Image (cartoon, rainbow, N blue to C red):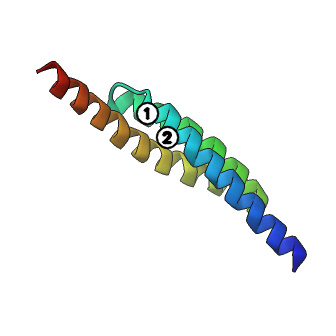
Amino acid sequence: MNKQLNRSVTINRVLGVGLTACALAAGGCNNAGEGALSGAAIGALGGLAIGSLTGSAGAGAAIGAVSGAVGGAVIGDQNERNAQRNRD
């Protein structure tokens, strides 16, 4: 039981750090393409870390890359729209 609790705490910490890193990296992107690229890279690393803890690193990396790319693209697109709105 103690091993399960430790694993759960570790997964939550890795997930929290990964999401924070993704938000910080994607926040500096100027458009959807940059956001998707950086989000996919950070998501893949985070997914790899979580997947290795749960026993399937490849699946974790793939899921992380896809979700990171989507999240990064959305944040990058919003940054581009905000910048354009501020120029007008």
Judged from the image, the secondary structure of the residue bearing numbered disc 2 is helix
Quadrant for the N terminus in the image: bottom right
Name the kind of residue labelled 2 in the image: Ala
Judged from the image, the secondary structure of the residue bearing numbered disc 1 is helix
- Single out the residue that lies furthest toward the bottom: 1
Cα distance between the residues tagged 1 and 2: 6 Å
Q: Badge 1: few (under 14), some or many (20 or more) residues near its Cα, within 10 Å?
A: some
Residue 87, picture quadrant: top left
| 26 w.r.t. 43: above or below | above
| 48 w.r.t. 36: above or below | below
Who's the residue at 24% across and 25% down the image?
Answer: 83
Q: Position of residue 51 (x, y in %)?
A: 70, 57
Who is closer to the viewer here, 41 or 5? 5
Name the kind of residue labelled 1 in the image: Gly
Residue 28 vs residue 15: left or right?
A: left
Q: Badge 2: few (under 14), some or many (20 or more) residues near its Cα, within 10 Å?
A: some
Residue 79 vs residue 48: left or right?
A: left
Q: Position of residue 26 (x, y in %)?
A: 45, 34
Are the two marked residues, 1 and 2, in contact with CB atoms closer than 8 angstroms?
A: yes
| 82 w.r.t. 48: above or below | above
Who is closer to the viewer here, 10 or 70? 10
The residue indicated by pointer 1 is 27
Who's the residue at 62% across and 52% down the image?
Answer: 16
The residue indicated by pointer 2 is 23
- Single out the residue that lies furthest toward the top: 87
Quadrant for the C terminus in the image: top left
Who's the residue at 31% across and 32% down the image?
Answer: 79
| 35 w.r.t. 11: above or below | above
Q: Position of residue 60 (x, y in %)?
A: 64, 55
Q: Position of residue 65 (x, y in %)?
A: 54, 45
